[in-house]
Image (tube, rainbow, N blue to C red):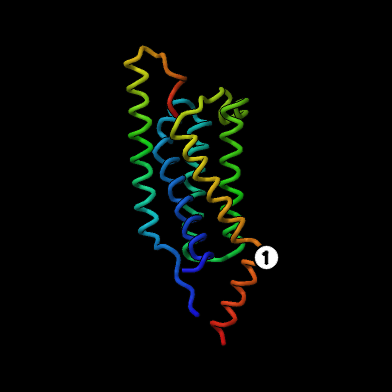
């Protein structure tokens, strides 16, 4: 029985890039919402 | 695909997701101060190292345990930052928001996957597989 190699490094890098883009999109949309609501949201964006 | 293989893939994916999120949020935290920025940059570097180690040396107990400790450390740091603040790195209390909370949930899944991989039964099964490979 042969063990399968784990997911390739290139795929991990791709996952990291998509996660980074998602985090940026979410944090910027949150920041935009905070700006438009006159700072009425909870705190700053990470 | 065996359970161990799925858990290892999950652990690598979790580290990659967390690395991406920490990398994306590093510039923003650098603007807050050197402490938070350096903390995020260090977390990114360590998570990238964990991904590389887990890929190059899959089923290495040290790599799996190190990744689990790193993810657990990030969860504890976030919990401290959002409740009391972290001395030096993030003295002001951080507000809980969706990106941070979701990332910590994903990291928690990685810790569970690592713990299951490190269970004696899992180790035994890996040993048996390795032994069968040698035979």
Q: Residue at x 47, y 60 (%)?
A: B9
Q: Residue furthest bottom?
A: B135
Q: A44 and B26: which one is in front?
A: A44
- In the rendering, at what x and y percent does residue B134 appear? 56, 84
Please state if B98 lies on the left or on the right of B124 as rendered.
left
Q: Residue at x 58, y 48 (%)?
A: B70
Crowdedness near tag 1: few (<14), some (14–19) or many (≥20) residues, C-alpha within 10 Å: few
At horizontal 52% and vertical 37% (from top left) the residue drawn is B39
Residue B121 is situated, as x and y percent measured from the top left of the image, at: 65, 67
Q: Position of residue A7 (x, y in %)?
A: 41, 62
Residue B29 in percent (x, y) is at: 45, 30
Q: Secondary structure at mark 1?
A: helix
Picture mark count: 1
Please state which of residues B105 and A43 is positioned toward the viewer in this rendering.
B105
Residue B67 against residue A43 in the figure, above or below: below
Instruction: Specify the subunit that label 1 lies on.
Output: B
- Quadrant, the C terminus of chain B: bottom right
User: Which corner quadrant of the image does residue B31 belong to?
Assistant: top left
A15 in relation to A21, above or below: below
Q: Relative to B49, is B2 above or below?
A: below
Res A9 → quadrant: bottom left
Q: Residue at x 49, y 38 (%)?
A: B40
Q: Residue furthest top?
A: A38
Residue to which mark 1 is pinned: B120
């Amino acid at each position: 029985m042969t063990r399968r190699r784990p997911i390739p490094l290139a795929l991990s890098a791709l996952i990291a890039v998509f996660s980074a883009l998602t985090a940026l999109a979410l944090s910027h949309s949150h920041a935009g919402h905070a700006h438009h609501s006159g700072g009425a949201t909870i705190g700053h964006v990470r | 695909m065996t359970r161990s293989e799925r858990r290892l893939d999950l652990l690598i994916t979790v580290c990659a997701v967390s690395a991406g999120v920490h990398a994306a949020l590093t510039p923003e935290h650098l603007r807050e101060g050197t402490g938070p920025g350096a903390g995020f940059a260090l977390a990114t570097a360590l998570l990238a190292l964990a991904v590389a180690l887990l890929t190059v040396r899959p089923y290495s107990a040290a790599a799996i345990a190190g990744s689990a400790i790193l993810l657990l450390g990030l969860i504890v740091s976030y919990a401290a930052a959002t409740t009391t603040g972290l001395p030096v790195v993030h003295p002001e209390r951080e507000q809980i928001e969706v990106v941070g909370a979701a990332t910590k949930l994903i990291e928690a899944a990685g810790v569970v996957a690592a713990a299951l991989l490190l269970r004696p039964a899992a180790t035994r099964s890996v040993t048996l597989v390795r032994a069968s490979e040698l035979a």
